[in-house]
Amino acid sequence: MPITTINSDYKIADIDNNFKVSAGPGAGKTYWLVNHIKNILHTSNKLSITRRVACITYTNTAVETIYKRLGTSSSQVEVSTIHSFLYKHIVKPYVSFVAEQYNLDISEIDGHDNIVLSNYSFLKEWKERTGQQRINDDNIVSEAFNKLRWKIDNDELIARTPYPFKIGRYPIKNDSYLEYKKMTWEKGIIHHDDVLFF
């Protein structure tokens, strides 16, 4: 993709190509993007009721800002974060194809969240399923779940924590984090990070 230096009033003549905007804070990226979207809405002959402009941004705050600045022009624009876009257009329509493989209860799925299950009955079941009944500090377990980050390596989901969590002299087993993930899927809960996995 060629790099073009622009100012905030620049208009791209060829509106049919993808592009990436990169600039520092306060440089006018959002201002330019909103004007570019408006330009597309007024000049494109490819838009229709079912064909819209997709605008993917990093944060929910940016999504709200862009919608607000588009005003009445926003009906033919879908502004979302990458996670929301993937969930709506990839995960939700097609997750049924992998639901059985991951024991995912698709009847319970209602979006993606940053929910961390840590109630007593859930943690009790997790301890039993992972053979860690000796762990008695649920707050540390909850903290470990909150700090989990996931990596996909050769189609395998791998849990990562910033440091090993221990309760007394008992460390939380690394493979038990995947059991946590499986238990959430059984309840139809898709975490924010899961969107990229599925």
Image (cartoon, rainbow, N blue to C red):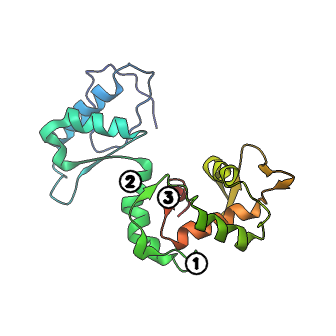
Nearer to me, 138 or 172:
138
Pointer 2 residue: 85
**Circles 2 and 3 in contact, beta carbons < 8 Å:** no
Secondary structure of the residue carrying tag 3 is helix
Question: Can the viewer see residue 176?
Answer: yes
Q: Position of residue 14 (x, y in %)?
A: 27, 38
- In the orientation shown, which residue stands out farthest toward the right? 169
Q: Is residue 64 left or right of residue 44?
A: right
Q: CA distance from mark 2 to mark 3?
A: 10 Å
Q: Position of residue 22 (x, y in %)?
A: 44, 29
Rendered residue at 80%/50% (across/down): 166
Pointer 1 residue: 101
Question: Can the viewer see residue 155?
Answer: no
Q: Is residue 5 left or right of residue 164?
A: left
**Label drawn at residue 195:** 3
**Circles 1 and 2 in contact, beta carbons < 8 Å:** no
The amino acid at mark 3 is: Val
As drawn, 24 above or below 85: above
Q: Is residue 91 left or right of residue 48?
A: right
Rendered residue at 38%/53% (across/down): 85
Rendered residue at 51%/76% (across/down): 99
Q: Position of residue 122 (x, y in %)?
A: 59, 66
Secondary structure of the residue carrying tag 1 is loop
* Total residue callouts: 3
Q: Is residue 137 left or right of residue 192?
A: right
Q: Position of residue 10 (x, y in %)?
A: 27, 23
Secondary structure of the residue carrying tag 2 is helix
The amino acid at mark 1 is: Gln
**Label drawn at residue 198:** none
Nearer to me, 157 or 48:
157
